Image (cartoon, grey):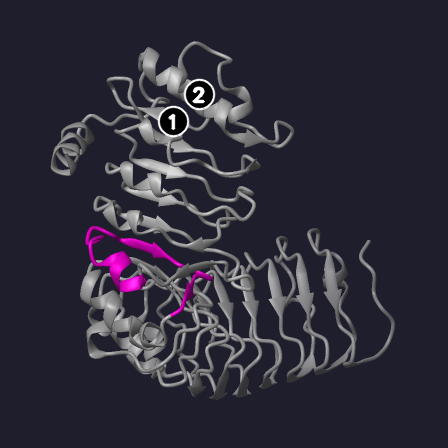
Amino acid sequence: MLSNLLFICFLFSSLIFTAHSYNNKCLRHQETMLLQLKQELIFDSYFSTKLVRWNESGECCKWHGVECDASGYVVSLQLDGEAISGGIGNSSSLFGFKYLQKLNLAYNVFRQKTIPKGIGNLTCLTHLNLSYAGFVGQVPSEVSLLTKLASLDISDDYFRNTLSLEHPNSEMLVQNLTELRELYLDGVNMTSFHERESWGNIISSHLPNLTTLSLVHCSLHGPLPKSFWQLHSLSILQLDGNNLSAVALDDLFTNFPSLTTLTLSECSLKGSIPSTLANLTKLIHVNLAYNLLTGSLPSTLFAKQTDLIHVDLSRNSLTGSLHSTLFANLTKLIHVDLSYNSFTGSLPFDNLTKLIHVDLSYNSLTGSLSPTIFEGLSNLVHLDLSNNSFYGNIPRSLSALPSLLELDLSSNQFNGTVQLGD
């Protein structure tokens, strides 16, 4: 039976078109199932923008959140943020959509309900998103039957840890999901101490082609095996809130040349930031905040990362002068946070006109604020230079910034009068 269903998935996968691109004819029995699903689900019509509007037209393939293939079969249900509560029974009409490839139930309020085992009937699924939806308890083994999955997201709020992987454990979950390219398990409780220590080997052994791995606040620890460094296709790596004190940053920067997003905040990382960070030329977002990093930043650290838009190195023990060339090539930079370190020198910005958020508070920066340094920063919303040693007058150009909403210059050594813009 399973092999037949998988064959059907393959047969229909080449016929997929979105309802918005083609005037697909709605199949009557598909419409009936959708209306039955709407009746089964408990949702708040005040907050709903999709379910509440179903049946407004006769073409169910044009309903909000619904996409069909060229034959009129439902292949995608995007029901995220619909204020759905209660639960979904294993006999729900949802599990009758046998050609369904994408299911998104994220950001709902299922109120302490478990993920339904009926999910295993949707064997054509390639994308499953159940994140932050209020599900609790053990992740059902039926998820491991979805062997066509390319993307799986069952993330949960890490401070609740209400979803767990015990039976199946993480290895049992992923060993059949060899087609996975994106895996998000943020906040999922891995109950096995062994798995929390050997997670790197589990991931690299079964999912060698991952492009996205997000395991934020999963209580992971231990050194990473050599096999983990073979995940050369990784583009997004998010491991915040785990104990990675045994991990060498140089290994991360050397072995993952395709990284666009790297977030390792609250990971107990030690030592200096190696110059090999410059090898990550595709980097767009980097967050190494709340660690134990020391040393200075090489002046060429970001020289090759011209697409970088977000840098957060706050709450470390970094020292040294911020070179004027440090951010010189980052013309797309919109967010920089270097607060709560021990940097010295003057403001390291010049002609970064796309900046929106700048926080350099709680450092040892000094010097006067040049009137020209803020010119052209028409997008700047947040600027915090507090608790440094800046001196001199506050330039009028600062008060003339059109988008500025939050400004903190307290605990410095400014003098004179505040010059307000015209």
Q: Is residue 43 above or below residue 58?
A: below
Which part of the image, by quadrant, shows the N terminus?
Answer: top left
Quadrant in which residue 298 is drawn: bottom left
Estimate the spatial distance between the alpha carbons at disc 1 and disc 2, rounded to whole Å: 7 Å
The mark nearer the N terminus, 1 or 2, is 2
Residue at left offset 61%, top offset 66% = 358
Considering every residue shown, the one lying at the far right of the view is 417
Quadrant in which residue 12 is drawn: top left
The reply to whether residue 231 is in sight is: no
181 magenta-colored: yes
Q: Is residue 393 above or below residue 61?
A: below
Residue at left offset 25%, top offset 52% = 180
Q: Are marks 1 and 2 in contact (CB under 8 Å)?
A: yes
In the picture, the disc for residue 36 is 2
Residue 317 % position (x, y): 55, 87
Residue at left offset 37%, top offset 66% = 305
- Give the structural element (helix, strand or loop) at label 1: helix
Residue 397 % position (x, y): 72, 62
Q: Is residue 321 above or below residue 16?
A: below
Q: Nearer the viewer, residue 396 or 37?
A: 37
- Give the structural element (helix, strand or loop) at label 2: helix
Label 2 CA crowd tier, 10 Å (few <14, some 14–19, many 20+): some
User: What residue type is disc 2 on?
Assistant: Gln
320 magenta-colored: no
Q: Which residue is mark 1?
A: 93
Q: Is residue 308 left or right of residue 352?
A: left
Quadrant in which residue 42 is drawn: top right
Q: Nearer the viewer, residue 211 or 408?
A: 211
Label 1 CA crowd tier, 10 Å (few <14, some 14–19, many 20+): some
Residue 301 % position (x, y): 40, 77
Residue 49 % position (x, y): 56, 28
The magenta-colored residue range is: 169-191
